[in-house]
Image: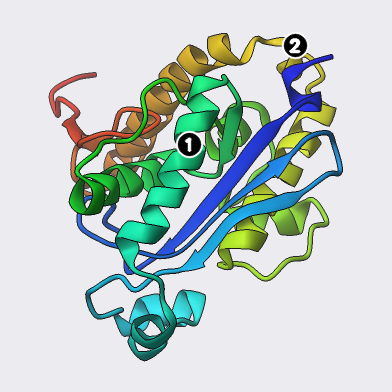
Amino acid sequence: MTWLQGLILAMDTETTGLNPDSDRVVTVCVGRSERPGDWTVMESALVNPGVPIPDDATAVHGITTEKATNEGADPAEALHLVRKRLQAAADNEVPVVLHNAIYDLTLLDAEFRRHLDKPMPDGLLVVDTLVLFRRFDHSTGSRTLEQLAHRNGIRFPAHDAEADALTALRLLHILAGDNDLLPLVPVDALQERQRVWSEAQQQAAYWRRRGNGHNPDPDIRPWPYGPIQTIRKDAA
């Protein structure tokens, strides 16, 4: 039995913006799958971020400042439960699936430090469908979760944390079905490969934008989360 046929977690967040260093969690979901086709939500919360939710963020996920303030959970309480699930996953070597892990995990690490005075648990085994689709899917077009789902026949309410987490897991199974050697790679070995692939993908995107006449910020992030690092502009 491969790791993809056993216990796996999947998670997603919706937030106040696009900056994982400073934006806040608005909704979060952690679910589990014990076998292909199985899905159980373990933690799902609307969170009071403690700051106003910008209109452009509300336009994406539909949650207003008023709703989050009046109905949202205390962030420390909600984040404690999420971190507890991630700590258990790390302790028991259970893979955690995300789409664009760098964003969600960097933001959650900042939120854990902000509200719990604790970092992201060490030793997470992360499976990032964005990195994997960029590496193994040779079709053209956007690789956002919504676009990948559409191209693979998945219909779901995008920018809903529960639906997004399950969709990432479904996409992983689809990708593995097209690349049957992927689940045979030990998940701990896959960590290092994703780290290398992510860095190469971010650098390629930077040089592609420069080649198209743009002047992008020379910023990349370590995978699966962490502070911004700088690409040397004079590198070839």
Could you say which quadrant of the image residue 222 lies in?
A: top left
| Residue sitting at x 67%, y 10% | 185
- Residue 118 vs 27, above or below: the answer is above
Q: Amino acid at mark 2?
A: Leu
| Residue sitting at x 33%, y 35% | 120
Q: Badge 2 is on which residue?
A: 184
| Residue sitting at x 81%, y 25% | 5
Q: Amino acid at mark 1?
A: Leu
> Is residue 124 found left or right of 139 in the rendered image?
left
Question: Within 10 angstroms of label 2, few (less than 14), some, or many (20 or more) residues?
Answer: some
What separation in Å lies between label 2 and label 1 (alpha carbons)? 24 Å
Q: Badge 1 is on which residue?
A: 86
Foreground residue among 122 and 232: 122
Question: Within 10 angstroms of label 1, few (less than 14), some, or many (20 or more) residues?
Answer: many
- Residue 223 vs 23, above or below: the answer is above
**Quadrant that contains the C terminus:** top left
In the rendered image, residue 60, in percent from the top left (x then y), is placed at: 47, 75
Q: Nearer the viewer, mark 2 or mark 1?
A: 1
Foreground residue among 139 and 109: 109
> Is residue 81 found left or right of 7 in the rendered image?
left
Label located before the other in sequence (2 or 1): 1
In the rendered image, residue 130, in percent from the top left (x then y), is placed at: 55, 39
Secondary structure type for disc 2: helix
The answer to whether mark 2 and mark 1 are in CB contact below 8 A is no
Could you say which quadrant of the image residue 97 lies in?
A: top right
